[in-house]
Amino acid sequence: MGFFETFVALRFLRGIPRQKGFISLSTFISMAGVALGVMALIVVIGVMTGYTQEMKKKILGISAHILLLKGGAPFTDYEQVAQKVRTVPGVSEVHPFIYTQVMVSAAGGFSGGVLRGIDPAMLSTGAPPGVELEQGHWRDLTAEGAGEAPAMAIGNEMAQKLNLKVGGYLNIISPLGRQTATGRQPSMKAFRVGAIFHTGMYEFDSGLMFLSIPRMQEFLGIGNQVTGMEMRVRDIYAADRVAQAIAARLGPPFFTRDWQKMHRSLFLALQMQKVVMFIILTLIILVAALGIASTLFMMVMRKTRDIAILKSMGANIRSIIQIFLLNGFFIGAVGTLLGTLGGLTLCELLKKYQFIKLPKDVYYLDTLPVQIQALDLLYIMAAALAITIVASLYPSWRAARLDPVEAIRYE
């Protein structure tokens, strides 16, 4: 496209003579439609991406990257197994864990939850990954206090629901219980709140509790047995390959589960929602593209004499098509640029001020996370420009088909 086509296209974008120097109202409305569509698409995709990444961060902060379990036999030789696992390339941390569902009773009421036994070595170096301490100290969970109830850590939502503070007492009831002469009886024991933590994810803050492995083994009466080993890897996206290498190194009856398999349904659902929202909101840009096509049709009708003159002066069909394609491209490009700037600005405001709150018990998170990825932004801008150019094809073709003799016969 040369200077001639660009010059004429820009002249055609100007309104009727009495509006000389200003973009016509129909052109402005078409640009605004594209801008609103692009802005809505950027904000929604940014929110969906942010929600997915925040969920991934919260889940992987608490959960292991890889779980190693043992089928058909008690898992008691975990120290020897841990030494073998540490030799597998890519593994950064290895810790035993115990996991069981329990009932909790306190002066403030009853609640269900998950009791998780963690390695004392992890507690001695700080906190479990992804957990922020609000009250108390993690070292209290490993302290040996004669005559005192064992200390445990609970989430801030559970503490609020059961009206518990650091130093308060609660009873833990395990349905697994102990095997007696009359059958299996539930176990119940009093514990002391040694720490209150916060993860930012309602499901964990309201139902997860931490206890050191020796205290949990004593409570459940399982001796030196653990549920399995949890591992963290250097590259979370290579967890599946590391898990396969661990399973191959140890062999049966050991088997592994990586985080992508354990949370596959959740992340697939979030990804599907993102794709569906992209398709649905692209319809807004399609509606705006119809406005561009309508604007170009009106321009062809209004500029019939000008087109005829251009063709009589030697402008060929290709030049006429390029002129109107440039018109559609300019409208789409300006609308896309304005929409991109508006969408990025709104995303920054959402990220900075977090003025949209979410119900924590429904969406797991209490604020609306936003994250813009460069590739998503590129896809949105490319899709908007492609749609506007396609919408300009037919009006451009109709303009090129005008017969100059018929167009100026009655002028």
Image (cartoon, grey):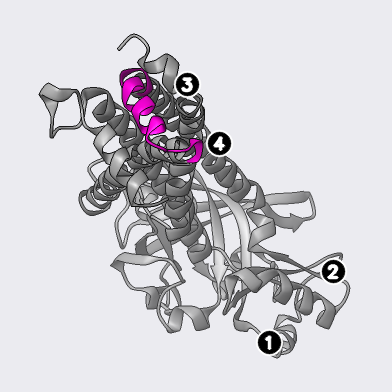
In the rendered structure, which disc, 1 or 2, sits on the residue that comes first in sequence?
Answer: 2
C-alpha gap between disc 2 and disc 3: 88 Å
Contact between marks 4 and 2 (CB within 8 A): the answer is no
Q: Is residue 43 above or below residue 36?
A: below
Numbered label attached to residue 73: 2
Numbered label attached to residue 276: 4
C-alpha gap between disc 3 and disc 1: 74 Å
Contact between marks 2 and 3 (CB within 8 A): the answer is no
**Secondary structure found at label 2:** loop
In percent of width and height, residue 1 lies at: 42, 50
The span shown in magenta is 300-318
Numbered label attached to residue 89: 1
Foreground tag (4 vs 3): 3
Q: What amino acid type is highlighted by mark number 2? A: Ala
Q: Main secondary structure of the magenta part?
A: helix
**Secondary structure found at label 4:** helix
C-alpha gap between disc 4 and disc 3: 45 Å
